[in-house]
Image: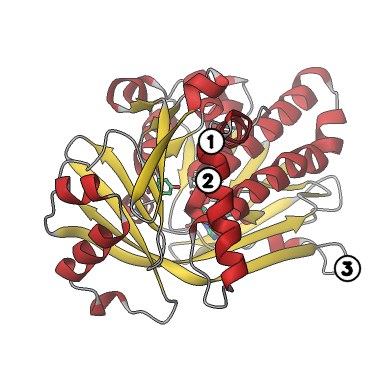
């Protein structure tokens, strides 16, 4: 087989890249390790930056998002059960869109199928070769048979546990990491959301977040120690803990119900440099991880895809390779700013095991500053709605 770009990974980064390249007449094959059912059953975050919204529309996959998503003009922050609001639209002119990543992935698969795109699922042992030459190829095994695809470029969109990042030689690849000493216990429940906008809460018992998927589906999180096991958290214990950490009026309004999904996720910041090596490009979680506090994971992946798509389009359309040469630098410049924002929100809102009374006062002052300063609110809002590409 031969194609122009082999895309490893059929998550949002890989599918969006495939869809955008298709619209420019560039052929791709997507190789995905898992089954489609598995990919579509993963529950992920749900806030889209405005640039992400515009990219999805430009890719021709925005219709259901525009119908079913919820535009949010701001968010609530809370400290010690007292909340205040930050208006994104007022500060930046832009809102965000609440629409689950699972739905985005679903819409992307539908669009690729409608266009007759090739997505090979349950592809085992995917391995790129010859990335430092000018004729790379990718091998994989499907149903016990080994296949080979020759191509011009390989896009590593295979997430944190993928094979692509490891193809960059150890002497070239640099990794930067912070692992946080806590996790998020998340619950999805078929109940009306407690608030019209998200609530991010700092509390002495730990962070809490009230989010949503739609008018009948809520998503809530509480910070838990890394050692906690999800089986040890009954639904009642979760609701009691959430109620303690959020503002009193929200706690009084909270409608509880059985958890339809419950899981614990660790928090980490991670960046790999460079994001291009020869004819291999990394995009999305393959190159970087953010803690979920700023809702940046999917949005960062979409930013990478923007740079990569424009670089490849210029190569095929005009024979112009400046975009390819500078992909890593341009993507990383935005990635690091979003890493900073996610780290800042995480640090401001969580209880750290080693936190001193001084650290505690710093958090309080940071939140008090945000509550009263238009400049501070604008800085948060411009990051939350998404830095420009
Ligand atoms: N071969 C083929 N596919 C692979 C391989 C491999 N060796 N390793 C991983 N994959 C697939 C995974 O099964 C997954 O479907 O690559 C895909 C990567 O998708 P995601 O992990 O969703 O990563 P990405 O597309 O970069 O999406 C951005 O932002 O909100 C965050 O983590 C969240 O998924 C989200 C991400
Ligand atoms: C979610 O809805 O799952 C969500 C929202 C905002 C975040 C993280 C997760 O910051």
Residue situated in front as seen by the camera: 113 or 327: 327
* In contact (CB < 8 Å): disc 1 and disc 3: no
* In contact (CB < 8 Å): disc 1 and disc 2: yes
Q: Nearer the viewer, mark 3 or mark 2?
A: 2
Check the picture and name the quadrant holding the N terminus: top right
In this rendering, the answer to whether 310 lies above or below 118 is: above
Q: Residue at x 55, y 40 (%)?
A: 370
| Dot 3: element | loop
Residue that mark 3 sits on: 171
Local crowd at mark 2 within 10 Å, few (<14), some, or many (≥20)? few
* 176 lies left or right of 163: right
Give the percent coordinates (x, y) of residue 360. 55, 65
- Quote the CA–CA distance across marks 1 and 2: 6 Å
Q: Quadrant of residue 176?
A: bottom right
Residue situated in front as seen by the camera: 261 or 340: 340
Give the percent coordinates (x, y) of residue 250. 23, 46
**Which numbered disc, 3 or 2, marks the residue that appears first in the sequence?**
3
Residue that mark 1 sits on: 372
Residue 180 bears which disc, if any?
none
Residue that mark 2 sits on: 368
Q: Residue at x 43, y 62 (%)?
A: 143
**Is residue 101 something one can see in this rendering?**
yes
Local crowd at mark 3 within 10 Å, few (<14), some, or many (≥20)? few
């Amino acid at each position: 087989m031969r194609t122009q770009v082999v895309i490893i990974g059929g998550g949002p980064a890989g599918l969006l890249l495939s869809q955008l390249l298709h619209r420019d007449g560039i052929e791709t094959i997507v190789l995905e390790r898992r089954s489609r059912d598995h990919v579509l059953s993963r529950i992920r975050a749900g806030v889209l930056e405005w640039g992400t919204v515009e990219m999805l529309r430009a890719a021709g996959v925005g219709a259901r998002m525009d119908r079913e998503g919820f535009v949010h003009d701001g968010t609530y922050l809370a400290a010690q059960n007292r909340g205040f609001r930050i208006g994104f639209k007022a500060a930046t002119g832009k809102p965000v869109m609440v629409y689950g990543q699972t739905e985005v992935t679903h819409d992307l698969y539908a669009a690729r199928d409608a266009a007759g795109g090739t997505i090979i699922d349950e592809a085992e042992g995917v391995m790129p070769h010859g990335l430092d030459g000018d004729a790379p190829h990718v091998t994989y095994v499907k149903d016990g048979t080994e296949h080979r695809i020759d191509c011009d470029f390989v896009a590593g969109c295979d997430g944190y546990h993928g094979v692509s990042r490891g193809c960059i030689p150890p002497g070239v690849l640099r990794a930067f990491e912070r692992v946080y000493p806590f996790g998020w216990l998340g619950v999805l429940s078929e109940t009306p959301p407690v608030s019209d906008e998200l609530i991010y809460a700092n509390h002495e018992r730990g962070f809490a977040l009230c989010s949503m998927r739609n008018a009948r589906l809520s998503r809530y999180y509480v910070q838990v120690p890394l050692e906690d096991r999800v089986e040890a958290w009954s639904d009642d214990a979760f609701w009691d803990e959430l109620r303690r950490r959020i503002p009193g009026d929200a706690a009084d309004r909270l409608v509880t119900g059985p958890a339809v999904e419950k899981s614990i996720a660790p928090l980490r910041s991670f960046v790999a440099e460079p994001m291009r090596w020869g004819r291999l490009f990394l995009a999305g979680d393959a190159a970087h991880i953010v803690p979920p506090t700023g809702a940046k994971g999917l949005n960062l992946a979409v930013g990478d895809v923007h740079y990569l798509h424009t670089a490849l389009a210029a190569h095929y359309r005009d024979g112009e390779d400046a975009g390819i040469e500078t992909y890593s630098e341009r993507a990383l410049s935005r990635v690091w700013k979003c890493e900073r924002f996610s780290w800042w929100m995480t640090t401001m809102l969580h209880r750290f095991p080693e936190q001193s009374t001084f650290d505690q006062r710093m958090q309080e002052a940071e939140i008090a500053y945000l509550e009263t300063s238009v400049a501070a609110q604008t800085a948060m809002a411009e990051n939350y709605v998404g830095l420009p590409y």
